[in-house]
Amino acid sequence: MQESGVKVRLATPADAAEVTEVLTASYSRLWQGHYAESDLAALLPLVTQANPRLLESGRFFLALSDGRCAGCGGWSIAAPGKSGGITPGLGHVRHFAVHPDHLRKGVGSALYNACLAQARQEGLTRMEAWSSLPAVPFYERLGFRVIEHFTVDFPGGVGLASVKMIADPA
């Protein structure tokens, strides 16, 4: 079901508090049951903070419903993580989240479509996502397929079970 009145716009550094709020609400609720409580206690403070580089990139978006932030997400040319590698033609979906009050209303799809349109303008033909476990079905609905399961290591020896996914949008 498409949520009426959803507007997608580029995020700016001034949106950091709203992005953090959506990331916190989304990940805190949706990751329950997929990851150990002890891991969530360590991971959530690290992964729910707005990423300043993404907010400054001109490639990160907010989805607004009735003037409030319903979701966020963006993309980059450089791979996430320490490598930051660049593969010609490949973009990387980054820091997607939909507020639990707006799930299954088209917010995530609207964000992805904005990312994809911008990536295509820059000549990219393939998108990659490092998905959390509960987000795999969302990315599959967008046409992504699973490539591999892996763990993202965080400080303190905590790992986040993740799924690398790829899409070749038409």
Image (cartoon, helix red, strand yellow):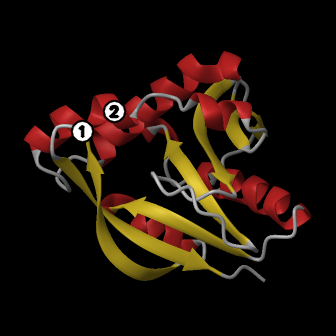
Q: Amino acid at mark 1?
A: Pro
Kindly identify the residue that appears in the image at 40 percent across and 32 percent down. Answer: 48
The quadrant in which residue 34 appears is: bottom left
Q: Residue at x 48, y 37 (%)?
A: 99
Residue 30 position in % (x across, y down)? 32, 47
Marks 2/1: CA–CA distance: 9 Å
Q: Of the numbered discs in the image, which one, if any, rests on residue 46?
A: 2
SS state under label 2: helix
Is the N terminus in the top left, top right, bottom left or bottom right quadrant? bottom right
The answer to whether any part of residue 140 appears in the image is no
What residue does disc 1 label?
155
Is 44 on the left or on the right of 75, as rendered? Answer: left
Task: State if disc 1 and disc 2 touch (CB < 8 Å).
Answer: yes
Q: Is residue 102 visible?
A: yes
Q: Position of residue 72 (x, y in %)?
A: 60, 40
Front-lying residue, 71 or 96: 96
Number of numbered callouts drawn: 2
In percent of width and height, residue 139 lies at 51, 68
Q: Quadrant of residue 136?
A: bottom left
Vertical relation: 95 (above or below) 137: above
- In the picture provided, is 153 more to the left or to the right than 58? left
Residue for point 17% across, 37% down = 156
x%, y% of residue 13? 68, 21
Picture layout, residue 65 above or below residue 77: above
**Which element type, helix, strand or loop, lies under badge 1?**
loop
What amino acid type should be assigned to the residue bearing mark 2?
Leu
| Mark 2 surroundings within 10 Å by alpha-carbon count, few (fewer than 14), some (14 through 19), many (20 or more) | few
Picture quarter with the C terminus:
bottom right
Above-or-below relation of 14 to 69 = above
Circle 1 crowding by C-alpha within 10 Å: few under 14, some 14–19, many from 20: few
Instruction: Please tell me whether mark 2 or mark 1 is closer to you in this view.
Output: 1
Which of disc 1 and disc 2 is earlier in sequence? Answer: 2
